[in-house]
Amino acid sequence: MTPEQSPEQSAAGARAQRLSDRRSLGRAMVLMGAVMILEIAGALASNSLALLSDAGHMFTDGLALGLAMFALTMACRPASPRVTYGYYRFEILAALGNGVLLGLIAIFLFYGAWIRFLDPPEVAGGIVMGVASAGLAANLVGLYILKGASRHGLNVRGAALHVLSDTLSSFAVVVGGGVIAATGWTKIDSILSAGIGLVIVIGAVRLLRESVDVLLETAPAGISLAMVRDEIQSIHGVQEVHDLHIWSITSGMTALSGHVVLQATTLAHSDRILNTIKERLKERYAIGHTTIQIESEFYREIGEVHESVH
Ligand SMILES: [Zn+2]
């Protein structure tokens, strides 16, 4: 282990990053909460479902931000003898719960939009336009706050995506309010609500798919098991690789385990070969957690060996 890659150092860096992400999320959450209350009041005053949809969307933003903050707090907790990987997967569980909730909110919006499309009520377009403009401005500020943080975990990125889609929906509601004020065509209010519902569904499906992938321990997107196996087998002295597994502990944290058979003549250099394997995995695939079992060609396996990758 070289000094510049010491796990203590990288863990401290990751921790500082999480604390900074958490502050950004907190600021954005307060902002979304304030605007959501404003939008609910505006929706009641103007009788606009589109505005209420936007408030619902803001609520999910606030929730996503809160869940992301909670997950980051849990990820800062150290591992224990029982919870050996630490609490990183709270992030994934939070993303999963968030996806389910988004789906439910979308169903509510579709239902409301359909009822109101059939029998469009009066809507005060001017109020809708004014309140949605405030929402739009708040979303833009929220996006700016999350800009630095959003590149990291699935949950922070999910929260930033929420805010982005809400920026678009707030803009649509501003336009819708303008159309109602100018022409009195109130059906646009229902149409916009359904549109916002659709945007929420798309976000929900993506979050669910990504979090379920992590929970099913599928190989992370962008890493091919066959390529990694070929890579290891191409290293001088390696005869064969089997029982290879690649999975995510949480988003952006990849783990690998596998058996590596060395040629009898190179067994004496097993440490050097093992280091070469680990360096390649780290450099080319950003796989930091590895457990590699070195075997000679005469080793007779005891216990379960995964057959699919032999
Ligand atoms: Zn083996």
Image: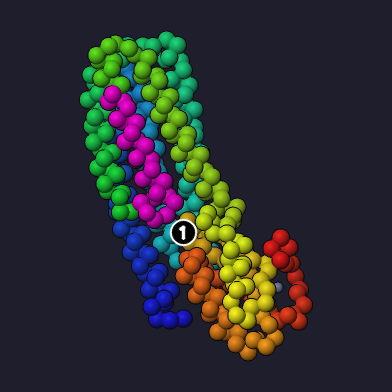
Residue 96, percent from left and from top: 51, 45
Residues in magenta, as a range: 150-175
Instruction: Please identify the quarter of the rendering in which residue 300 is found.
Output: bottom right
Q: Residue at x 36, y 51 (%)?
A: 150
Q: Is residue 100 above or below residue 298?
A: above
In this view, the residue in front, 61 or 305, is: 305
Q: Residues within 10 Å of mark 1 (few under 14, many from 20)?
A: few
Secondary element at tag 1: loop
- Residue 104, visible in the rendered structure: yes
In this view, the residue in front, 64 or 179, is: 179
Residue 65, percent from left and from top: 37, 46
Q: Determine the quadrant in which ligand 1 lies.
A: bottom right
Kind of residue at badge 1: Gly
Q: Residue at x 51, y 48 (%)?
A: 210
Q: Is residue 280 above or below residue 104?
A: below
Decide whether the magenta segment is chiefly helix, strand or loop.
helix
Residue 159, percent from left and from top: 38, 45
Residue 27, percent from left and from top: 27, 47
Instruction: Please identify the quarter of the rendering in which residue 6 is found.
Output: bottom left
The answer to whether residue 163 is left or right of residue 107 is left
Q: Residue at x 26, y 34 (%)?
A: 136
Q: Residue at x 66, y 71 (%)?
A: 241
Q: Is residue 304 above or below residue 88?
A: below
- Residue under label 1: 252
Instruction: Please identify the quarter of the rendering in which residue 297 is found.
Output: bottom right
The answer to whether residue 217 is left or right of residue 59 is right
